[in-house]
Image (cartoon, coloured by chain):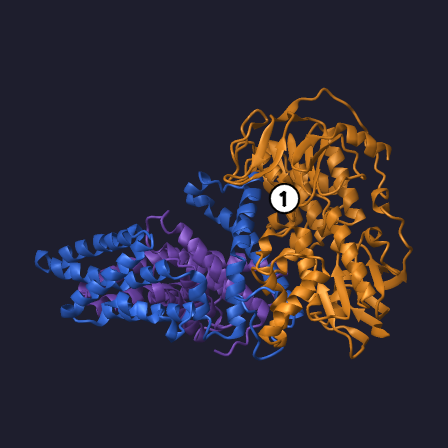
Chain colours: A purple, B orange, C blue
């Protein structure tokens, strides 16, 4: 990939990705509910998007998170973990391409969060189908994880506008996503 | 030989603010040592970054750079500049980026380590170094590509006395080798033997400064407190103990019982890494991995969340705790949570003469102002015990005065204050010193008397 | 069978370094994981045998399998009831096979992280990465202890200032936003500042000035 991100933005994305991985591994066993990882993913991806303000920031964050997770041996997924982090991020970035200037930040965050969850749950659906799970069971599992993950993702998305506007009020961000 | 010359430099942040550098002129020749002093926010750091060519915003004026000029810049906080995990790789970072062949690196790196007087293995992890050693490591990381001009940003504030002494030796030998040095420093007296040219940066211009008398920083502030000795109550008790982390060697031993009483200021003095911060955190009940210690604070074993507004702790770099939209909200945050009168926030701003800042974002303030606001937010709770970790670090005189003012006021209200510092604090009238040296924590009552006489 | 092959890999005349060995392990785990998805039921037996060897290898190197088993059981607990509800008893076996496949897909990853050092995996992964991103990852991981320390300290500071974020207070979801504003926001501010400073520090040391930077010899003979 060409990397036109400047070093400062790249480092910030890297820090977010690392923090995401570590927080996820710390929270994993404390909360019984599956889907809480969508909270952290949505939160950090949207923060990266808001701070760096560029299409591609979320994808980079997701891929870096996957790489970091492999290097830190978090979540014993092996190479598969790259997809787990990367796929929702890529879906969100892809959706962003069609959304520039359509919604305000709050609604954009919400839509992106749901799209991310869709990709996350969809990855589970596809791998379950590949493995030979019956369509109905796979769909039921998909629905279950979409609802659980969606709630967490939504909660994160709702926090984003306030956090970003605060960062902006402190003059810490060069440009706010309009 | 002229290395770099600045002429008629103008620079400012945005159009609405006045210029930080206004028609500034400066010439540096090889082997010279310059020291630039000035208040916080006077543009000292901007000037260094401008010279190094790393200024992010445009400026006006002429800069002459000699073809032989190669600049190294050591920034303030060594911890924020460490890019690698071990000493060798850290120093080699610059060489890698210049494309120096790997087999030439080891020798260059070792030479550079010797130049700053660090005799440690190349595989030493950076984290085991003291702050003073890290600072010199950062210098080595610059010296490895042989700069002809070395820029240093506020070295004194980061270092303890032994660190300053070591740095003096290193700088001396660099000057002898013909390297030019420009340092920005609000306590130039610490480097008085090296510096040939003293400057004062004021209103955007450099004025020739006077050669400071050694250790003058100590005596510049003269604040007298109205001492009123009230009957005091013991606030914290430390029985003799060995202070150590779980499964580690002791940091220090405390052989005699120590106590803190209401209405007194005690200064805890020791070198970097002696265990001052850990002791303060232990008293506040937030230090993890510490063995069980015979310490009681306000008649309880210290634990997070049991003291409410009775105990305050100001950690290093207290600007980290700021998060509200305005300074006033920041000050009112704890008052609200502890259900104390909100009017105290405005009152303390008025006492500090900072009412103008009430509606500002705390993150737009200068480092010194942020420091004062963070401290004020604790002082207005009127805690029974206030712990301060190095509260004077990196502050210029103007802000030191404000900190002293707040502390004396709090003491007169009967609070006990324990503050740590890596040097003695002659500008604040403390009641007692505690010292950590050679692995012992002791009450230095007799030494305080000497200091007061001196 | 596989163990033998791996031994072969380590024979000196191949001159395989530890990193090459790690790359081979990475590839192997990738192949085995995909096998769990695409192999027909009849070939699953072979896959189980191979994965069993990996488990033995991992356990031999004193790694715990309990986390892995827990994931497997959790998966079983979700999928089997669904199968029972939707398809009834007769297809339960099919459900078991599905869970088995999921488990077999995860297992090589566990083996990889159990037998390979994270740094080594990082080195292999960064073979293909551009210098900048390799630096970003190394710096982020290197700074991890610092970031966690900062987060802990900011949390403690705000607790002492009376924020409703003690573990007890956090049981009430009403207090969760306070955690975001008092702790996460300041941490983000610190990360922003840190990224700015580190980028500056790296540029001051000529980061990005040549297209192909050289590398510090990590293993060398001290002079």
Q: Quadrant of residue A132?
A: bottom left
Residue neighbourhood size for the residue with mark 1, other residues' Cα within 10 Å, grouped as few (<14), some (14–19), many (≥20): many
Residue B361 visible here: no
Q: Quadrant of residue C32?
A: bottom left
Compare residues B175 and B47 and report the one nearer the observer: B175
Place of residue B145 in the rendered image (x, y in percent of width and height, measured from the top left): 69, 71
Place of residue B366 in the rendered image (x, y in percent of width and height, measured from the top left): 72, 54
**How many callouts does the rendering have?**
1
Give SS at disc 1: loop
Compare residues A145 and B300 and report the one nearer the observer: B300
Q: Up-down: is B74 above or below B95?
A: above
Q: Residue at x 41, y 67 (%)?
A: C18
Q: Is residue C100 left or right of residue C18?
A: left
Q: Residue at x 61, y 77 (%)?
A: B99
Q: Residue at x 72, y 39 (%)?
A: B348
Q: Quadrant of residue B32?
A: bottom right
Q: Residue furthest left?
A: C90
Q: Up-down: is C32 above or below C68?
A: below
User: Would you name the residue on which mark 1 appears?
Assistant: B315
Q: Quadrant of the C terminus of chain B?
A: top right
Compare residues B112 and B91 and report the one nearer the observer: B112
Q: Quadrant of the N terminus of chain B?
A: bottom right
């Amino acid at each position: 990939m060409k990397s036109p991100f400047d070093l400062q933005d790249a480092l910030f994305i890297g820090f977010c990705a690392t923090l995401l991985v570590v927080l996820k591994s710390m929270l994993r066993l404390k909360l019984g509910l599956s889907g809480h990882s969508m909270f952290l993913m949505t939160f950090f991806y949207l923060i990266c998007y808001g701070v760096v303000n560029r299409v591609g920031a979320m994808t980079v964050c997701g891929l870096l998170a996957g790489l970091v997770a492999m290097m830190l041996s978090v979540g014993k997924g092996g190479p598969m973990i790259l997809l787990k982090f990367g796929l929702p991020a890529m879906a969100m970035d892809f959706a962003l391409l069609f959304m520039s200037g359509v919604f305000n930040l709050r609604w954009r965050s919400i839509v992106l969060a749901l799209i991310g969850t869709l990709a996350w749950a969809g990855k589970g659906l596809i791998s379950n189908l590949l493995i030979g799970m019956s369509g109905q069971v796979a769909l039921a599992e998909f629905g279950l994880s979409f609802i659980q993950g969606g709630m967490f993702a939504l909660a994160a998305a709702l926090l984003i506008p306030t956090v970003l506007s605060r960062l902006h009020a402190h003059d810490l961000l060069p440009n706010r996503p309009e | 030989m002229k290395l770099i010359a600045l002429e008629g430099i103008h620079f400012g942040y945005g159009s609405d603010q006045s210029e930080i550098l206004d028609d500034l002129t400066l010439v540096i020749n090889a082997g010279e040592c310059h020291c630039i002093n000035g208040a916080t926010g006077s543009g000292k750091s901007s000037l260094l970054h401008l010279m190094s060519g790393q200024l992010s915003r445009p400026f006006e004026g002429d800069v002459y750079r000699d073809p032989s000029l190669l600049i190294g810049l050591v920034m303030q906080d060594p911890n924020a500049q460490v890019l690698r995990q071990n000493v060798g790789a850290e120093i080699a970072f610059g060489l890698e980026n210049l494309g120096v062949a790997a087999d030439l690196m080891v020798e260059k790196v070792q030479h550079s380590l010797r130049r700053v007087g660090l005799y440690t293995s190349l595989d030493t992890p950076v984290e085991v170094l003291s702050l003073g050693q890290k600072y010199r490591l950062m210098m080595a990381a610059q010296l490895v590509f042989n700069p002809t001009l070395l820029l240093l940003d506020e070295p004194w504030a980061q270092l303890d006395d032994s660190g300053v002494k070591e740095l003096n030796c290193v700088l001396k030998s660099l000057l002898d080798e013909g390297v030019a040095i420009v340092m920005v420093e609000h306590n130039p007296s610490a480097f008085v033997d090296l510096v040939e040219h003293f400057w004062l940066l004021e209103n955007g211009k450099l004025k020739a400064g006077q050669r400071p008398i050694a250790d003058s920083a100590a005596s510049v502030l003269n604040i007298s407190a109205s001492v009123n000795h009230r009957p005091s109550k013991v606030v914290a008790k430390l029985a003799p103990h060995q202070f150590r982390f779980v499964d580690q060697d002791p940091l220090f031993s405390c052989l005699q019982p120590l106590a803190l009483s209401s209405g007194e200021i005690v200064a805890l003095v020791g070198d970097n890494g002696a265990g001052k911060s850990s002791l303060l955190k232990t008293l506040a009940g937030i230090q993890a991995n510490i063995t069980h210690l015979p310490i009681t604070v306000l008649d309880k074993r210290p634990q997070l969340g049991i003291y409410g507004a009775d105990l305050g702790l100001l950690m290093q770099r207290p600007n980290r705790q700021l998060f509200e939209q305005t300074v006033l909200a920041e000050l009112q945050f704890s008052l609200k949570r502890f259900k104390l009168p909100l009017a105290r926030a405005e009152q303390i701003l008025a006492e500090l003469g900072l009412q103008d800042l009430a509606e500002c974002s705390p993150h737009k303030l200068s480092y010194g102002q942020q420091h004062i606001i963070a401290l004020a937010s604790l002082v207005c709770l009127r805690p029974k015990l206030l712990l301060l970790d190095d509260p004077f670090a990196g502050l210029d005189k103007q802000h030191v005065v404000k900190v002293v003012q707040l502390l004396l006021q709090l003491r007169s209200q009967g609070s006990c204050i324990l503050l740590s510092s890596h040097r003695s604090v002659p500008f604040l009238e403390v009641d007692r010193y505690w010292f950590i040296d050679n692995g012992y924590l002791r009450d230095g009552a007799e030494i305080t008397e000497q200091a007061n006489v001196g | 069978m596989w163990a033998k092959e791996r031994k072969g890999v380590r024979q000196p005349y191949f001159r395989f370094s530890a990193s090459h060995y790690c790359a081979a392990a990475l590839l192997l785990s990738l192949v085995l994981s995909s096998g769990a998805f695409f192999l027909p039921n009849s070939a699953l037996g072979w896959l189980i045998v191979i994965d069993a060897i990996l488990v033995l290898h991992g356990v031999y190197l004193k790694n715990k399998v309990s986390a892995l088993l827990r994931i497997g059981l959790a998966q079983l607990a979700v999928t089997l009831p669904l199968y029972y509800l939707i398809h009834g008893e007769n297809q339960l076996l099919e459900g078991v096979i599905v869970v088995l496949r999921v488990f077999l897909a995860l297992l090589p990853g566990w083996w990889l992280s159990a037998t390979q050092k994270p740094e080594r995996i990082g080195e292999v992964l960064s073979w293909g990465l551009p210098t900048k991103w390799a630096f970003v990852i190394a710096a982020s991981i290197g700074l991890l202890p610092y970031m966690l320390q900062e987060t802990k300290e900011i949390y403690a500071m705000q607790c002492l200032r009376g924020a409703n974020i003690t573990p007890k207070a956090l049981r009430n979801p009403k207090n969760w936003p306070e955690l975001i504003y008092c702790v996460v926001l300041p941490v983000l501010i610190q990360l922003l500042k840190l990224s700015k400073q580190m980028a500056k520090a790296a540029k001051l040391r000529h980061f990005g000035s040549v297209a192909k930077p050289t590398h510090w010899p990590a293993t060398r003979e001290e002079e």
